[in-house]
Image: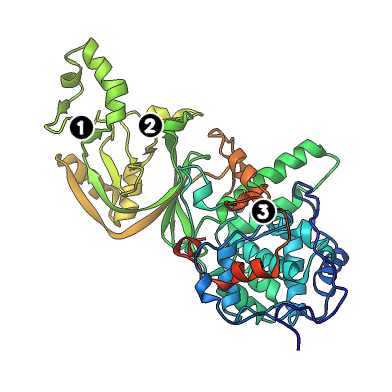
Amino acid sequence: MRAPWQAVRLGCPKPAPVTAVQAPLRAPFAGALAALALAGALAACDTMPERPRTGLGSLADNTPQVVIAGETLNGGLLRRFYARHDFAPVWTSRRKQADSLMAAVLHADDQGLDPDLFHARLLRHAATLSPFDRELLLSDAFLSYAAALAGGAVPVARRNEDETLAPEPVDVVAALDKAIDSPDPAAAIAALAPATPAYRALRQALRQCRPAPARGEAGTANCRRTIAVNLERQRWLPRKPPPERVQVNVADERLVYYRDDRPVFSTRVIVGQDAQVNQSPEFRATIDASFFNPPWVIPRDIAAKEILPKVRRDPTYLARNRMVMRADGEIEQQPGPDAGLGLLMFDMPNRFDVYLHDTPDQSLFRRENRRISHGCIRVQNPRAFAALLMRQSRDAIDQGIAQGGTTRHDLPVPVPVFVIYQTASVDPDGTLRFHPDFYDRDAGIWKQLNSRPRERHAVTQADDRPLSPESLQVALGAAPSSAERAE
């Protein structure tokens, strides 16, 4: 009778770390390579060691990081996944499913993702790893790939504070289990990615960015980088966009209103300046009302930097510009045709206090560079936009404004709005267009997309040694903490 963790078959290869080689996104691997990698991953030992079934629940605290050959695994997801399988090996009895999923991981660059984000480098040399390490690497690769398709490879916690978009959460552990039991596991995982026309068009464009003599290496690399970054941004959006929605692409300086999933209105917008403090953020909100003749409560930073210096030079400045000092110390500009918000504001509460609104100077929309606001978004044709949102005629909007006084008008149905930053976007007719990255945000996302697995999770102690049976027990045997469930 063998002891727990004792290998059934002698001669299994001893684990050894593999030298890391970083590489950019590459063309899809041939089917033979995928099969070879999988063969090395699964065929080195016919039988996995048995797994002890007792005492695992007591190991919930102080669980060490799971590190294999220098690459950090997602311990929280692994614990949840193996808990569903009684902490027994999964892939030795499911080689067909693993073959399908491995092929998908090795072709991750079709989705604008580097296969090495999902341990492809190690799994190509899987024969040098222990059965335990191979088992964990396969599971982590599939779980991480599913998570990247479902919600993006760059989570909100690792982005700039202005990049807050995220889709509805997906339980990738349950999704992987479902994929395992499906006729086509790779297709089941691929279904976690967006199926929107924009995502499909960007994937097609990525294929066209593959090396071509006329384009040259630099042009090809820039094309692939831009498309990959914008595929990632698409993964931050809902899988089923609301049929009625407003989309503002800051990079394109344009607003599009969709009804029944069709664009029914499009107009130019003015967006935040290039300086980071005034950039328009990426976020989701809901327009629930329109304000006719709105006052403008001037943000304190604008008042301190721009208004008060003018008041010091000209004591009549506030009165001449219909501004008053409120009891709470705020400066408010009274409603009127020359007010900063114009005659219309669309109320969409959000943490950034960024709104869609009118402007008294319509000539600004003729500018090629319309990045001149403090972050809010000025709409070129706000009355036509309001008429559509409120299901009223343009005359009714004009009459309501002409009555004077500040009035709030709730929308019949609140309308979600997505403020995005797509430097490669797809027009409603399917045309792909590129826009300047004037906020310089692409580079940060690209860097994250090319971070090695050891960099993606916090590591308490660097350790390139393969996992021992004892450390594997601790790593997999505990229930996830609340922080790990959030992973």
Asked if the residue under mark 2 is in contact with the one under mark 1, i.e. CB atoms within 8 Å, the reply is: no
Residue 484 in the image: x percent, y percent? 50, 62
User: Which of 413 and 222 lies nearest the eye of the viewer?
Assistant: 222
Q: Which residue is drawn at 67% across and 79% down?
A: 51
For residue 212, which quarter of the picture?
top right
- Residue underneath mark 1: 336
Label 1 packing within 10 angstroms: few (<14), some (14-19), many (20+) = some
Q: Identify whether 317 is placed above or below 267.
A: above
Quadrant position of the N terminus in the picture = bottom right
User: Disc 1 or disc 3, which is closer to the eye?
Assistant: 3
The label on residue 289 is none
Asked if residue 118 can be seen in this view, the reply is yes
Q: Name the amino acid type tagged 3.
A: Pro
Q: Distance between the residues labelled 2 and 3?
A: 38 Å
Q: Position of residue 44 (x, y in %)?
A: 85, 73
The residue wearing badge 2 is 374
Q: Which of marks 1 and 2 is in front?
A: 2
